[in-house]
Image (tube, rainbow, N blue to C red):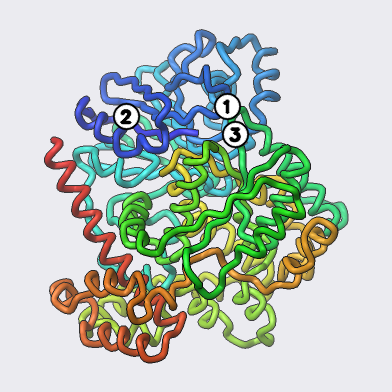
Amino acid sequence: MCRIFGSFAVAATGAELATVSARQRHGGPDDCGLRTGRGWSLGCDRLAVTDPAGGAQPFTLPTAPGVLAVLNGEIYNHQELRGQLTGRGHRFPDRCDGSLLPALYTEFGPAFADRLDGMFAIAVLDLRERRPRLVLAVDGMGMKPLHYHQGPRGALRFASEIPALLAFDGVPAAPREETLDTVLSTRTPFGTETALRDIRVLPPGSVAVARGGEGLRMLRCGPRASAPRTEPAPSAADVLETLRREVHRLADVDLPLCALTSGGLDSGLVTALAAEHTEPLHTFHLGYRGRWPGAEHTYAKAVARRARTRHHQVALHPAELPSLLTRTVRHLGQPNADPITVSTYALFRAVREAGFTAALTGDGADELFGGYDRIRAALAAPAGADWTAAYADALAAAPRLLREWLYTPEYRAFIAEHGSAADRVTAELRACGTERAGALQRFETRRRLPAYHLRRMDHLSMAWAVEARMPFCQPDMVALARRLSAELRTGKRALYEAGRGLLPAATLRRPKQPFTLPLSAMLAVDGPLLWTLRELLSPARLRRAGQLRADRVQALFARHAERPSDQDALALWALGVHELWTDVVQGLRVSADLAA
């Protein structure tokens, strides 16, 4: 697991590359490797997980001359691939999973990514011909993002994190004017666009190639299509066995491993199955000091007790939240309006401070197995009814009517002319036809999950040099979930059936609850976050920006003080996150200019 970066068809100074590396060194504190040449650079900040004593990057091999590679992630089938490549005459200096990449590329070219099972973002530099070639690839779920900037005459710069990418000369920090609407409509940008106008992210499952002066060309823009299956649809027992196999496989790690346990179904299943393989298994749960609504610690303890783990209850002091919010927004590089981000950041800090380098999580289950209320509501809507607007509002930090009430007339006109992120979501869903279950699963797993959850997990785990491993997002698990009947993959019925006998009855009976901040209570009068958001959303500041009506934002504060509501609290939080992010981006650009 690492942070990677590089440039192609453009010169980069040593000072630039040092700043790029320094900005993401938190994710790769164990080693730093860099190679440069005429018009190219390739670098890596390494978190040593597989074969910690080996694995120096960029990877090179005597049997693959002229090919260099860097890897962020884990290749779980590297032992099988190593055996195949050894049979083709290649020799490897260590057991590190990424060491085989130059050989794999030499044998199969850009199709090398089709043979990888894991989570990864990879850059391969091929110097064997007169015109070098750069190949970029990311895993099929987008667990390991790769951000890039395409400049004039094919100049390409890339990095694992946006703050690092902004340290390159020639990469502007220009926010999209529609970002505020995107944050309120979908909580974070979806797809290949980011909140910055000139920075994009590779789509899940993509392979892209650049040759000097030609720019980046997508060879594949999504996961490799799998062959159709003719056997009967899988059962809940098949789901359990596949999940057990994936959890056990991902629990094989050379360094200390733990599990994150919210007390819910998804993380509970991962915890119970990991405890079969790892003894003793340590589990972590985060809560807040004091009495707050929605506390889950009793459920998490029950899961840990049932699985016989060594449980760590992390109690975060609410007074620390304002400073954590700033650091969280900076690490994410673009706004994400879900309060879960701050909780996630604090939880991984506790995991790292306790001495753990890898953590199993339950992310991806809700998207694959239809766990969200909005999915059930959409499937229950009668034929011919337009369920897409309600679905889009359920994704939002502020529903459409509230957004339009908050916008200035000028900004409302701008969004009407250029289109809202919510409009793009509804248009995409309306085009799905009558087969809603499959269409919703594709939207949730291919559009929302990579941008909203997986990017957050990558950035906030690596902020503390912890590798987050996600069994539900592995290829076999994803393929099986997509073959389930609509009944079993709605409301997570298959997972509830799988959990019988493994989890406490209280966990199986409880309603779904996200792992997040008790935001409404924390924004109440004298709440620990109220004055932080009031400062970020001061009338003078909002009038300067010209996108929000300052009087109506203040009215929203007053309404929440009088009648606290989760919806108003989330809208205020989203507005504050957007304002804080604009400060962070401006600061990153200024610091890069000073370094230059």
Q: CA distance from mark 1 to mark 3?
A: 12 Å
How many numbered marks does the figure carry?
3
From the image, state whether disc 2 or disc 3 is nearer to you: 3
Kindly check if marks 1 and 2 are in contact, taking CB atoms under 8 A apart as contact: no
Quadrant position of residue 79: top right
Q: Position of residue 298 (x, y in %)?
A: 65, 64
Instruction: Specify whether 81 is left or right of 194.
Output: right
Identify the secondary structure beneath mark 3. Answer: loop
Which is more N-terminal, label 3 or label 2? 2
Q: Secondary structure at mark 2?
A: loop
Query: Which residue lies under the disc numbered 2?
Result: 212
x 54%, y 9%: residue: 63
User: Residue at coordinates 44% horizontally, 69% vertically from top-left?
Assistant: 186
Q: Is residue 330 above or below residue 400?
A: above
Quick check: 217 above or below 266?
above
Measuring 54% from the left and 38% from the top, which residue is drawn there?
Answer: 356
Q: Which residue is mark 3?
A: 256
Percent coordinates x, y for residue 191 in the rendering: 45, 57
Q: Is residue 18 visible?
A: yes
Q: CA distance from mark 2 to mark 3?
A: 43 Å
Q: Are marks 1 and 3 in contact (CB under 8 Å)?
A: no
Quadrant of the snapshot with the C terminus: top left
Q: Which one is nearer the viewer's eye here, 420 or 315?
A: 315
Compare residues 28 and 404 and report the one nearer the observer.
28
Callout 2 amino acid: Gly
